Image (cartoon, grey):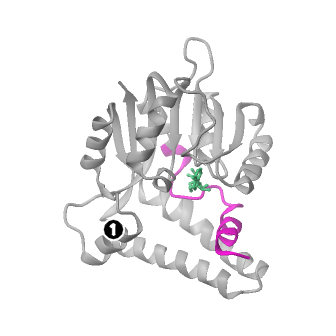
Amino acid sequence: MDPLRLLIDLHADGDRQGPGAAEETLRAASLAGLDGLDGGRALRIADLGCGTGAASLALAGALGARITAVDLFPAFLDELRRRARERGLADRIDPVAASMDALPLREGAWDAVWSEGAIYNIGFEAGIARWKRLLRPGGILAVTELSWLTAVRPAAIEAHWRAEYPEVDTVEAKRAVLVRHGYQPVATFVLPAACWTAHYYAPMRARWPAFLERHGHSDAARAIVDAEREEIALYEAYSEHYGYAFYIARVC
Ligand code: SAH
């Protein structure tokens, strides 16, 4: 099996495919003023790079919002469908297999564009620029993005993220990018460490033995686990210097 299929297989039965928590999703919604109906109708939210739907399920469940949940990989959307049915939310969540840089979505129609741990796939600046036209006037953008939390970083972690994600920057710099693209920042907060450890890394770690077993401990499967282990070690060593910040902004 090729590395991409293996990566999907490791992550497809996870609650989430990146750092986050339902509580933080709902905190962002509340800071954005999205707390239920808009003039008597359900909010329409596009969740881009939804994975197995952690944010979609939270928003549909708590706000009664109608979610269009977009991901590139159908295996994640299948799992999202299953979860939505299980929670009685299937009629509020519409899964769509598409790429976030070629979205088959109506423009000017969305109350909010949501994206947790996923905008990096096309880059923060390209994403916010492209997604702006989806929003209705006054619509909300809510995304999490890898950000520096300190002004001075050890060379090892600086070099790692510069190589992996050249757009990594401070929270202030990211807010400036939002302003440059015609957004008005509403709120920003840093995801607590438990979003990485308890909600993402620990459950993923617990899936490693079954994953390795399924793939006969192949070199390729072990390489995937080793790469994840390395990412976790970096977080354990340097989490004071980087994290995910939630950026909530309104389209002007
Ligand atoms: N929002 C989810 C998943 C985050 S992981 C959560 O918080 O748990 C990033 C997600 O982006 C994965 O599900 C991956 O399949 C998806 N993805 C990667 N490239 C994409 C693209 N070009 N278009 C849409 N989704 C993409």
Name which residue type carries label 1.
Arg
Residue 45: say if magenta: no
Q: Residue at x 58, y 24 (%)?
A: 43
Q: Is residue 35 visible?
A: yes
Q: Position of residue 28 (x, y in %)?
A: 45, 38
The residue identified by callout 1 is 162
Q: Residue at x 29, y 71 (%)?
A: 158
- Left or right for 99, reference 79: left
Q: Residue at x 41, y 75 (%)?
A: 234
Does residue 89 lie above or below 19 as drawn?
above
Q: Nearer the viewer, residue 58 or 167?
A: 167
Q: Nearer the viewer, residue 198 or 38?
A: 38
Q: Residue furthest top?
A: 39
Q: Is residue 28 visible?
A: no
Q: Position of residue 235 (x, y in %)?
A: 41, 70
- Left or right for 231, reference 186: right
Q: Residue furthest front?
A: 102
Q: Position of residue 39 (x, y in %)?
A: 56, 11
Q: Quarter holding the C terminus? A: top left
Does residue 138 lie above or below 56 as drawn?
above
Q: Magenta residues, as a range?
A: 1-24
Under tag 1, what secondary structure? helix
Does residue 53 lie above or below 32 as drawn?
below
Q: Quarter holding the N terminus? A: bottom right
